[in-house]
Amino acid sequence: MSNNKIVILVLAILGIIVGYLIINKPATPTTVPPVTNFDEREFSPETASTSISLATTSPLEIATSSKSKIQGPAPDLDHTVIFSADFPNERKVFLTGELTKSKAILRGDIGNWNAWIDLANQVSTAGDNQYTIEIFNFVAKNLPAWGLPYSNLGMIYGYHLHDNVQAEKSFKMALAREPGVSYYYIQLYQFYTDIDQLEKAKDILRQAISKKVPDYLKLKELLDSLELKS
């Protein structure tokens, strides 16, 4: 495959991801856009790398009322978020303010799942991985049809804690919950390429293609390009 075709293919795959993030917005917008401190790397079949960030959108309309029964216990809102040692002081002041806002919202409505996702992203930005994991697991338990919490757990385990076993398990849980979402297949494919498991990367693309997920023909082109390199 020519370099021009590969570039076009990469742009097409990025289009899938961007389209997913734009179209599938939560029913209730979050208070502020979460910030992330993940390393940004170029997405391409050649480098098999990805832009590491937590997804913040959902293909579901999320309930935001605490009237429904909460499957708990909920994460401790009095927990003092632990910032990484190299976190810039000027950003720490701002992020501390955002953490306070999110916690205040949740104290008023413990079932506001958008606020929990905001808080998890803010906590992850600070570098408190264990508290982030606790929050995403809590959301996952209460919204059993939603793949996003497990998708984000996969990113934490895979790219922050370098626990590939838990990362793979989390990514697969996201797919099991929402097997029709192409974004999750791309995410797992990218994880496999990042850890040099190209056969698994190909297999996950084949699964997406067989299910004819949105834009599956573009994924087929990506698979074909990988097959040519093998």
Image: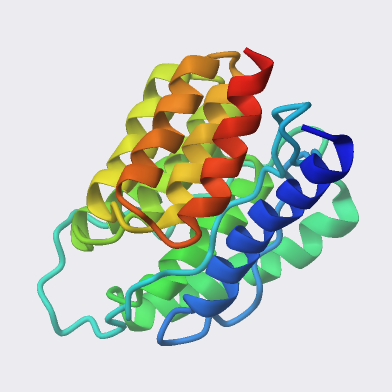
Counting from the top left corner in percent of width and height, residue 210 is at 32, 44
Q: Residue at x 58, y 32 (%)?
A: 224
The answer to whether 143 appears left or right of 71 in the picture is: right
The answer to whether 160 appears left or right of 210 in the picture is: right
Q: Residue at x 87, y 36 (%)?
A: 3
Which of 192/151 is in front? 192
Whether residue 10 is situated above or below residue 64 in the rendered picture: above
Q: For the C terminus, which image quadrant?
A: top right
* Rendering colour mode: rainbow
User: Disc count in the image?
Assistant: 0
Counting from the top left corner in percent of width and height, residue 14 is at 68, 55
Whether residue 22 is situated above or below residue 1 in the rendered picture: below
| Residue 132 visible | no
The answer to whether 147 appears left or right of 187 in the picture is: left
Q: Residue at x 84, y 35 (%)?
A: 2
The answer to whether 45 appears left or right of 178 in the picture is: right
Q: Which of the 4 image quarters holds residue 28?
A: bottom left
Counting from the top left corner in percent of width and height, residue 48 is at 70, 28
| Residue 127 visible | yes
Which of 52/31 is in front? 52
Q: For the N terminus, which image quadrant?
A: top right
Q: Residue furthest left?
A: 69
Q: Residue at x 43, y 74 (%)?
A: 114
Q: Which of the 4 image quarters holds residue 203?
A: top left
Q: Which of the 4 image quarters holds residue 16?
A: bottom right
Counting from the top left corner in percent of width and height, residue 185 is at 44, 44
